[in-house]
Amino acid sequence: MRTLLDKLWAAHEITRNADGASLLWVDRHLVHEGSHHAFAKLAERGMQVAEPGLTFGVADHYAPTRHRDHVDDPDIAKMLDRLEKNTAAHGVQFFGLNDPRQGIVHVLGPEQGLTLPGLLINCGDSHTSTHGAFGALAFGIGATQVAHVLATQTIWQAKPKAMRITVEGTLPAGVTAKDIALHWIAKLGTSGATGHAVEYAGPVIEALSMEGRMTLCNLSIEGGARFGMIAPDATTFAYLKGRPFAPEGADWDAALADWADLKSDAGAQFDREARFDAAEIAPTVTWGTTPEQAVPITGRVPDPATLTGAEAEAVQSALDYMGLTPGQKLDGTRVDQVFLGSCTNARIEDLRAAAAVLKGRHAKVPGVVSPGSMLVRAQAEREGLDAVFTEAGLDWVASGCSMCVGMNGDIVAAGKRCASSTNRNFRGRQGKGARTHLMSPVMVAAAAITGTLTDARPLMEGRI
C-alpha cells in the first residue's frame, strides 16, 4: 500500500545515491525575478537552459501594482529587466508586465493549466507548495538548486516523511480554508510538520473548492512541512478542463485515466497522523510574529506571566513588537490599514467573498486590493467587484506580490497595523516595523469596515 507521496516520488525518481537522496525529474520550472543569480551561474559556464519548453518566467515579486508604463524605482526596474532578458536569451516563455496573463506565479500556474496532477513543480519560492492542491509534487528551492534545474531539468532531494492531516465534519459558516490552516498551525506549531510532506484529507477537504485547496497547501510550509498536497478528484478535473496548457481531446481522456490513481491507497501507512474537528475551527487571526501565534477572533492574546522560559520570552517579545498587551481581546483591536492579495488569497473566489461583505459599506481605514493575476482582475471587473472595492474606499490595483513582501513599492509603514490576507506575519515582512495580522479575505473586509480586528460573521449574514 502506497501513499500519494510514494507514488509521485517513484514516478519522478531517476536514481538514488548512497546517502538516500533522490535525483528527480522536474516537469515544470517556474522562475521569477529572484532567479537572476541562477541565470548568472549558467552564463559563467556558457550553458543554456536544458528544457526551455518546461521553464516559465513570471514577473511578480517586484511587479509594481501602479504606474506600470514607467517603473520609477531603478532597482525594481533592473530586477524586471533582468528576468525579461534572461528568459528571452534562453527561449523561455515569459509572462511579463505587459502580458494580459501576468500574475503571481502560484496563481498563474494553475490558472493557465501549467499545474497538473502528477507533475513535479519547482520554483525558487517557498510557497510553491500551493500547486500541491492539484495532486502535484510541488516545493520551493534555493538559488543554487534553481541553477541546477535550469541546467539539468533535475533536482537532488531527500524524500520527506509522510504526514496526513484529516479534517472531519463540516465547516461552520464564515470559516474558510485560511482558518483551517491557521488553526492547525496554531495547534501543532510552526515546526509541527517539519521533515514531512502533508497530505490533506477528509470530508472538509473534499468539499473545498480548488481556490480553498490552494490556500491550504500554500500555507503548509508555515507549519514546517516541506510541502502539502491533496489527491485530485472531480473538483480538480473540472477546474483544469479547457485551461490553455491542459491536455485536450484524447490526451485529456488519457490524462484522466492516469490521474485516477493519484491517491493514497486504502490502508497506506503514514509516519504521522493529525485529526481536527471542523466544528472547533473558528475565524482565526494571528496576534504575533509567526503564523503559529494565532487564536480565534473571539479569543485573547496570551499572557507571558502564565508561561515559563523561552516560551514566555517569545510571547513577550511578540507582544512588544505588535504593540499588544497581555490578555488583550483581539476583537476590537484598531487597525491602520488592510490588504487583500497574495498567492494565498487573491483568487476570484476570495475577491467575491470580500466584496460580498463590503458591498454598500464604506471602509474606515485605507486599503489595497491586488488581484492574484491580471486575468483574475479582468474577471473581477466584468463582475463589477472592482466598483465594490473602490466605492468602499479601497485602492484597486494591478497584480503582483504587492504588500505581501514589501519589495515592490507597496509597504506598511513602521508601527502601523495591517489586517492582511497574506501568508507571513514575520517582523518587517510588509515593511520595516510593520505589524501584520493574518486572516481570511472576509475578515480583512470586516476589518476595513470597522477599522478593527473583528468577527466577520455578523457582517456576512444574508450576504454569503
Image: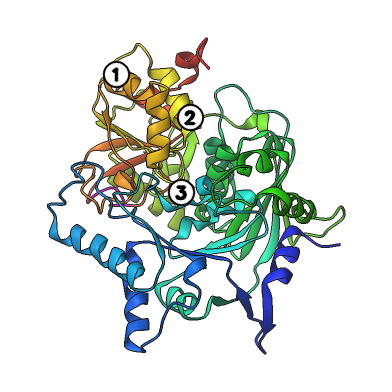
Identity of the residue drawn at 54% across and 54% down: 114
Say which amino acid is labelled 1: Ala
In the image shown, does 385 or 221 lie closer to the viewer? Answer: 385
From this viewpoint, is residue 55 visible? yes
Q: Residues within 10 Å of mark 3 (few under 14, many from 20)?
A: many
Q: Do the residues bearing badges 2 and 3 touch, measured as CB atoms within 8 Å? A: no
The mark lying in front, picked from 2 and 3, is 3
Residue that carries the numbered disc 1 in the rendered image: 392
Q: Tell me where residue 83 sits by quadrant.
A: bottom left
The residue most toward the front is: 249
Q: Do the residues bearing badges 3 and 1 touch, measured as CB atoms within 8 Å? A: no
Cα distance, mark 3 to mark 1? 27 Å
Say which amino acid is labelled 3: Leu
Which SS does the magenta portion mostly show?
Answer: loop
From this viewpoint, is residue 329 visible? no
The question of residue 347 being in magenta is answered with no
Q: Residues within 10 Å of mark 2 (few under 14, many from 20)?
A: some
Residue that carries the numbered disc 2 in the rendered image: 299
* In this picture, residue 270 sits left or right of residue 338: right
Q: Tell me where residue 146 sits by quadrant.
A: bottom left
Identity of the residue drawn at 38% across and 37% down: 371
